[in-house]
Image (tube, coloured by chain):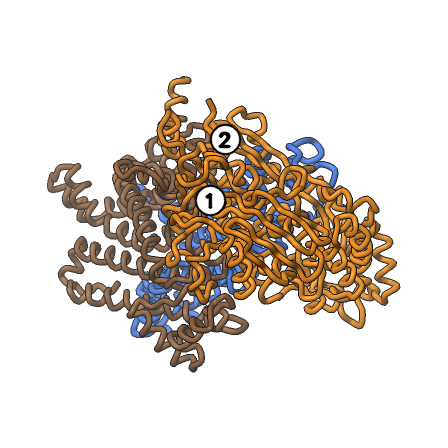
Chain colours: A orange, B brown, C blue
Amino acid sequence: MELGLAIAATAASGTAMAQAKQAGKTVVFRIGILGDVQTLNFWSSNDVNTQVLQEAVMPRYGYMDENGNVKPNLLRQIDVKDGARTFVLHLKPNLKWHDGVPFSADDVIFTGEYLVKHKLFQNTRFSNVASVRKIDNLTVEYKLKAPQVGFADVMMFWVAPMPKHRWEKVTDPMTITDDSQGLVGLGPFKLTEWKKGQHYILNRNPDWPAALGVPAIDRIVYRVYKDENSIVLALRTGEIDATSRQFLPSMAAQFRKNPQYRIFETQSPGYSYIGFNHKKSEFAADLAVRQAIAHCVDRPKIVKLALEGNGAAMPGSVSPIYKDFVKSKIEYPAYDIEAAKKLLRDAGYADTDGDGIVEKNGKKLSIKMMYEGSRNDYDKSVRIIKEDARKAGIDLVLEPVDRQVYMDRQSKTKEYEMLFVQWGAIVVVYDSFYNLYGKDAFLNYSGFQNPELEKWAKDAKESATLAESIKPMDEAQKVVVHQIPTLAVWMPNLIFVASAKFDGYLPYPSSSNGAISLISLLNIKPHQ
Amino acid sequence: MFRYIGLRIVKGGLTFLAAVTVTFLIVRLMPGDPTTAFLSDSMTAQDVQALSAALGLDKSLPEQYALFLRNLVHFELGQSFFLKQAVSAIIAPRLAWTLLLIGTSLFITLLIGIPLGVYTARHKGKWIDQIVSTMIVLGISIFIPLLAFVFVYVFSLELGLTPVGGAFTPDVEDSERIGDVVRHMLLPTATLVVVNLAQIVLYTRNSMLDVLKEDYIRTARAKGVNDRSVTWGHALRNAMIPTVTVTGLMLGRMVAGAVLTETVFSWPGVGSMIYEAVQKQDFPLLQGAFIVLAFSVILMTLVTDLVVAWLDPRIKLDAGIIR
Amino acid sequence: MRDIGFVESFSKHRLGMIGLTGIVIIVALGVFGPMVVAYPVGYNEAMPLAAPAREHWLGTDGLGLNLIDEIIWGARTSLFISLTAVAVATCIGVPLGLVSGYFRGRIGGLIDSVIEIAMTIPTLPLMILISAISGPSVGTVAVVIGVFSWPTLARIVRNSTLKLASLPYIEAAIVLGIPRRTIMFKHILLNAVGPALVDLTIIMATAVLTEAGLSYLGLGDPNAWSWGSILQNAFRAGHQFHAWWLIVFPSLAIMFFVVSFNLLGLGINETLNPKRD
């Protein structure tokens, strides 16, 4: 019986190759990704799957460790001078692009300028740059217009350098997707073969400097899966060794007691929130309504039911992992249906026709809430919120849509009244607060504006030291929890599952990469 | 016979025309701006211009229709919103996978179904017939996602004999490629076979029963023709006619079953592509997928009609039966 | 006269009677259930994902709602959809079938061609397309299923009509001067009812399977409870491995409905056309 099962199990792992290869031949590591990679042009998209591939092929300057601190990958050292107005970056030596050209200061300088010139993603990280200067082949000096203590951290976490020699002639970078340009990065793995919608295959880069860690993995295969269930099944049968995404608690449950798998749990640096589009809905524009809705959000209950307990409430607008900035405990209105009802009454809303929903000027208080329908945690959360809002007399109409459609409406067409979604990561919070709430800031999807909030967020960003940013952050938070441009709900625990056939996983808190970040990939080796 | 064949081809052509016209109307008459069905914000200005010209989005409906038909003949189906490629290029490989799946399932279904139907007709009333009848009723009532789930749970998870989905493994060696695809095909094919077998057995059995009662069978028996020869020779040939006809009619249902099956098993065919295109509201892709599917079904129906023509002596002789 | 005979012989058909019993149960659940049980909405903090027990016979779902309530309201949805589909198919299919069978000439042939064309177009993809464009709603799905079911019904009515229209007593009726309309509706229609009924049971069974499929794919109405959407919720949340009741009971419900109608159809069919040697 056992022999039969053993044979069956061997035949089962998607290919028997994995087994054979681990016995001293090529080490292949298989990763499942949810949904296809949107584009192989790393700089023209912020798609999560593009970023997954990027970890191995074209790593960013830095990463965030388990304590929420940003550490460098490609830089040896950073000097901060002149009250955070001058930054000197020292590159690590011996890094080469995949086509053999050495990585140098020229690439660093080119990247910043090119991103800004063509308004590509991450160009905002350089908006404060006054001038940049090459000191030598491995040293670059940035001078900023205003102090910004988070400048280097932000750049390290978000930006990957571009090979100048490949991109300087390209005039329309947004049209480059995959086939034409050819993928040239400088990471420990090279993209050698791919089939859109199916798989992407990377082979080890022999030119990756040994000093930075030699990967034990020879080949990485990324397989595309269309939904969570398929990916979970694939992990169970051994078709893949790890997934790029975290699992829902119920999906992770089946792996917990199983010695063939490793489970990692980290707290997410992001959080879920409700967004309001004051331009498309008169109710969303009404402060009383937003505050009333805030009173209808019972965070502990939502965490219990929607996340099955795997997460934590986010009581304010800054994640508790940034301890310095939550000391003052500036929190959103508490869960209180009666308070919500009173707010609405005082604002002139009343239920005149007895159907349980209030009206004003003959119009029912009804708002559409858009969210990604395939995410079960979102679906459950919005259903709970809808029910509680109904108790207060507010009718929230659920609008589940596909991910693609969601992204389009949220960022491009802005065709939504309310939304429920999650930030993957809000890092260097004193710097990114402005990106969330500033006038025309790129993460301020609804274009919310408030002069006080604008001032405080800007002050926080332009602080010369970390300590100086605390007060403006507190003041900014006070405005946010009162005006409620967005309403934070929960922070998920990120649960990552990987095969015990490998050791050396180093999971860092970043929602797209989990147990397969660059550092991890350099460290993973077959289990002995 | 040739008149019959000619008539069938004309009918097939008309059916296809009807199908594509329905698609055309649905997509263009939907509420809202019809251009949103074909142009998306993520396209560059150049693409927008080129596509508008190619699809004639600024012209009147009849003109658009004419343009639409002309484009069809040239296999021009527009450009996918999200994959930014020509729809026809995307569909081609996926159609191959779907045909592989449907073709294999159909073949196995007929291989098992027809003999089984004949056998139970001959042994009507006996226990084997009762069992099969019960299974037929269960078979036509099956909910595909459930069957697929049970198959995957038992065979992929618990027994580890089959992969969980997809049609192939990416980095497999060339020598193992065929075996790899076959292993991936096992569960989806099994699902389709189970669902369609019941139909085929039902119809074969019933039409055999009808035929076995017919006068000319009694005559053959009275003449002393060997019983088996009566069954497999005369009776089967005539019972086949309704069966083949039904197969043709069933193709529409098989396609529906294939859409669900492909989606559940992530089989990269046209069926799952329809699902993906709907999710992303990629209308050009959706329209293209539908047209291609309709064409395949109609073509296969035509083929079955031709087989019927070959089988039915009344048609061969153009004996004036209007179908 | 004929009817009494039919009912008597049908009651002897074991499988058919089983089917009928099943349908009675479903109708009871779907019609009277919602009067007794509240519409499941929102959440119930107390016991999410609880296994079947005394307080909740079939267990609870991810939001703590009682599964049995969801199944009862799902029965209502299934009945609504299948009956609407039947109504639509009948309104279109029966008149067309009658006309096509009775007026055998050009009109008959033309309608028959239309029927054949309509039968060949693959319906699920088209339904998915329509669902995507018009947005998912129970009403739309029901009407669309009905619209795709009329061809088979029309064909059956037509064949019945063809057979009957040439019978001697019909010709006698014409000679006697009985108006054509009376002939069509009274005599022919009444006698075509039998086979048509069989097809109607098939339409109802297929309607539920189709709707379950659409809901399972996420194209169903998010505001209506349907057995397919219960399944979809369960799969999407990954509950299928540790909350077996969320998969088993809705699936059983679907199969119960479909099998009952198919058995009924089988029973009617075999009662009308006994295949004795």
Query: Residue shown at 62%/37% (left/top)?
Result: A249
Please identify the quarter of the rendering in which residue C44 is found: top right
Q: Amino acid at mark 1?
A: Leu
1 or 2: mark nearer the eye: 1
> Vertical placement of A364 versus A215: above or below?
below
Residue B18 spot, x, y in % from top left: 36, 69
Please identify the quarter of the rendering in which residue A122 is found: bottom right
Q: Nearer the viewer, residue A435 or C113?
A: A435
Judging by the rendered image, the residue that carries numbered circle 2 is A499
Which subunit holds the residue at mark 2? Answer: A
The circle drawn on residue B97 is none
| First in sequence: mark 1 vs mark 2 | 1
Query: Residue shown at 74%/53% (left/top)?
Result: A464
Task: Give how far apart the Cα atoms at labels 1 and 2 are.
Answer: 31 Å
Quadrant in which the C terminus of chain C appears = top left
**Circle count:** 2
Query: Residue shown at 41%/45% (left/top)?
Result: A190
Residue B204 spot, x, y in % from top left: 29, 45
Dot 1: element? loop
Judging by the rendered image, the residue that carries numbered circle 1 is A95
Which subunit holds the residue at mark 1? Answer: A
Q: Circle 1: is it few (<14), some (14-19), or many (20+) Cα within 10 Å?
A: many
Please identify the quarter of the rendering in which residue C83 is found: bottom right
Q: Circle 2: is it few (<14), some (14-19), or many (20+) Cα within 10 Å?
A: many
Left or right of B226? Residue B120 is right
Q: Nearer the viewer, residue C208 or A212?
A: A212
Q: Amino acid at mark 2?
A: Ser
Residue C264 spot, x, y in % from top left: 46, 46
Determine if residue C89 is in view. Answer: no
